Image (cartoon, rainbow, N blue to C red):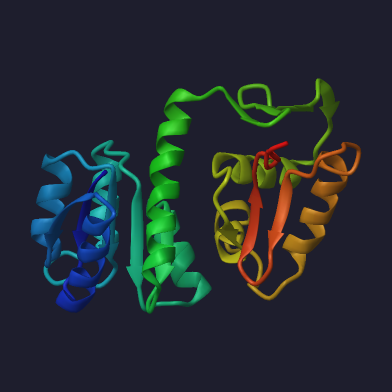
Amino acid sequence: MKILIIEDDLHVAEFISKGLIENNHIVDHQSNGKEGLFFATTEKYDVIVVDRMLPEVDGLTIIRTLRASNIETPVLILSALADVEQRVEGLKNGADDYLIKPFTFSELLARIEVLARRQYHEAKLTKLMVADLLLDLPGHNVTRNNQKIDLLATEYRLLEYLMHNAGQVVSRIMLLENVWDYNFDPQTNVIDVHMSRLRKKIDKPFDVELIHTIRGTGYVIREPEKINS
């Protein structure tokens, strides 16, 4: 992937750039908003990572300008501003994700990869499949082993997000941000309740479980492991 980083903290920028390059990505870095906006509007990137507080042009202005120019490149905001209202403001201004400083590189990389996959899938896919579980995107229909499964709206969004990231562990925070849009406190049990209901419909009637809890980390939906005879 080709990734643009707009970050005025050179230590943070170097930390991100080094990690992305080590993961075989191409990185451009700009340390002020004016130059960052120029690169974001004149070059093609798979993902843009932008600090919210920047010299000359702030991060939200950059994002609004991109969206007003019909540039739909996924944007991840990095910010020390952690209040729910500030995160919601970032998303309402056109950001696709919001990561609070300080952060681990592994979570940053996971979020970048999720944004890139989501953009590709939305452009290319009409269905998602994990083993015998099929999700028809245009029709919002779910079947497993050719049996129709009726899901409530939140259950469907939860399953769709898991299947978009099949094989990848997604954290509780990522689920709250992408399925519930920050409407709940991270300590709420809303995820556990909906995940339990989803599993009763997706896994319980069948012989093989597809949705797994990764203790202390999050959840993953994946193909059953093949056992060599």
Q: Is residue 122 left or right of residue 164?
A: left
Q: Is residue 185 left or right of residue 28?
A: right
**Image quadrant of residue 169?**
bottom right
Residue at (42, 27) in percent of width and height: 123
Image position, residue 217 (x, y; %) = 61, 67
In the orientation shown, which residue stands out farthest toward the front? 229
Residue 225 vs residue 69, the one in the foreground: 225
Task: Name which quarter of the figure residue 176 lies in.
Answer: bottom right
Left or right of residue 111, residue 186 in this image: right
Quarter of the picture holding the C terminus: top right
Please state the horizontal and vertical placement of residue 34, each as a whole percent of the image: 10, 60
Relative height, residue 223 to residue 115 (above, below): above
* Number of numbered callouts drawn: 0
What residue is rendered at 75% in x and 45% in y? 155
Residue occupying the point 46% across, 40% down = 118
Where does residue 120 sit, x and y in percent of width and height?
41, 33
Q: Residue at x 60, y 57 (%)?
A: 175
Taking 202 as reference, is 174 left or right?
left
Which residue is more in the foreground, 145 or 121? 145
Where residue 215 appears, as percent x and y from the top left, is 68, 68
Q: Give the answer, above or below, for where 37 lies relative to 72.
A: below
Q: Residue furthest right?
A: 205
* Image quadrant containing the N terminus: top left
From this view, report whether residue 5 is shown above or below residue 136: below
